[in-house]
Image (spheres, rainbow, N blue to C red):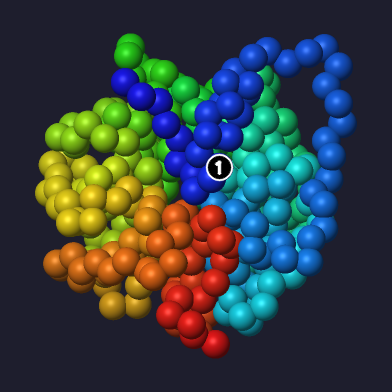
Amino acid sequence: MKRSIKHVGALVSALAVAVASACVPAMAADPAPVPAMKARLAAKVPLTGLVRAGDALIAVGDYGTVVRSTDSGRTWIQADVPVSTLLTEAHFVDAQHGWVVGHGGVILTTTDGGVRWTLQQELADKPVLLSVHFTSLDKGFAVGAYGTAWRTTDGGRKWSPMKVGEGADADMHLNHLFATRSGALFIAAEGGLAFRSTDGGDTWVSLPTGVSGSLWSGLESGAGEIVLLGMSGRVLRSRDGGDSWQVTEDESAQSITAGVVDGDGGFIAVGSGGVVLKVHGRLQSEIRPDRQNLAAVQIAPDGAVVVAGQLGVERMNGER
């Protein structure tokens, strides 16, 4: 089975090298982290994550880049970041407190809405981290390549390993962790795998999805459906908490990498090749003319759709 990890465009091959490197034991004396270099066009580097922090938007990506917008994505300011490694995902538990994860087991944190960032942890063995999610100021989770799973109960000051898969499933890439409004946790994973925890991450069960391609992301729709997004244009929806799934395949057959709930009870998803899906009961798709690979999507405070990918971050459809 071909092992792959979510990313964008020209960085795919670089990620494969980085994953292999991350699994090699660290030398006794690791060099000090190199801060991210400031760049005039920082918002146009390849970006992999995009989140809301109150009325601000935060995007993260390659070279340790973190950019922040307070005008719904029209302009962006690069933040000072203490590392220059690839950053993969961000999550905010409220408007001020957030975390970012990336390669090398890096976990960054902010307490001022993303203006300033500090290096909170470099996890043991420097794993490739792909997703971070906090359910409160104290309790959080970070997952990633080759079954990497960690948890914290003190706001990220200390992290401990967490067991998710068993047997052959224990080594699969864990691509994205998210929570539902009821408090259940879900992980979208490699090889069509999905996992669920209903006890705050203490125990996990594998869910039969009926698909074999990797699942890159997930969310809970406004209507309460559990949604998983994956390879070949697949959108999986469950109305019973993940016990059974309805599978729809977009005719574009492009990988669907991320989604966000919109204001009408549906959701918008994006993926490779410039595909954009709008799902309100039925699925509608379009292909952006630039065909750039998209890694993340958010709804800005003014209602505009903002996307991030291989060409950076922008408001959709030329909106100003």
**Nearer to the camera, 64 or 253:** 253
280 vs 313, left or right, is left
SS category of the residue bearing label 1 = helix
**Nearer to the camera, 15 or 129:** 15
Give the image location of residue 319, x and y in percent.
49, 85
Q: Residue furthest bottom?
A: 320
Give the image location of residue 47, x and y in percent.
58, 55
- Disc 1 residue crowd, few under 14, some 14–19, many 20+, Cα 10 Å: few
218 vs 52, left or right, is left
Question: Residue at point 32% right, 66% down?
Answer: 287
Question: Residue at point 22% right, 31% down?
Answer: 212
Give the image location of residue 216, x and y in percent.
37, 43
**Residue 160's image quarter?**
top right
- 204 w.r.t. 247: above or below: above
Give the image location of residue 53, x and y in percent.
60, 66
**Residue 155's image quarter?**
top right
Q: Quadrant of the C terminus?
A: bottom right
- 70 w.r.t. 53: above or below: below
Question: Residue at point 37% right, 56% down?
Answer: 273
Q: Amino acid at mark 1?
A: Leu
Question: Residue at point 21% right, 69% down?
Answer: 284
- 120 w.r.t. 97: above or below: above
Residue 78 is at least partly visible in this image: yes
191 vs 131, left or right, is left
Residue 112 is at least partly visible in this image: no
Q: Quadrant of the N terminus?
A: top left
**Residue 70's image quarter?**
bottom right
The residue carrying mark 1 is 11
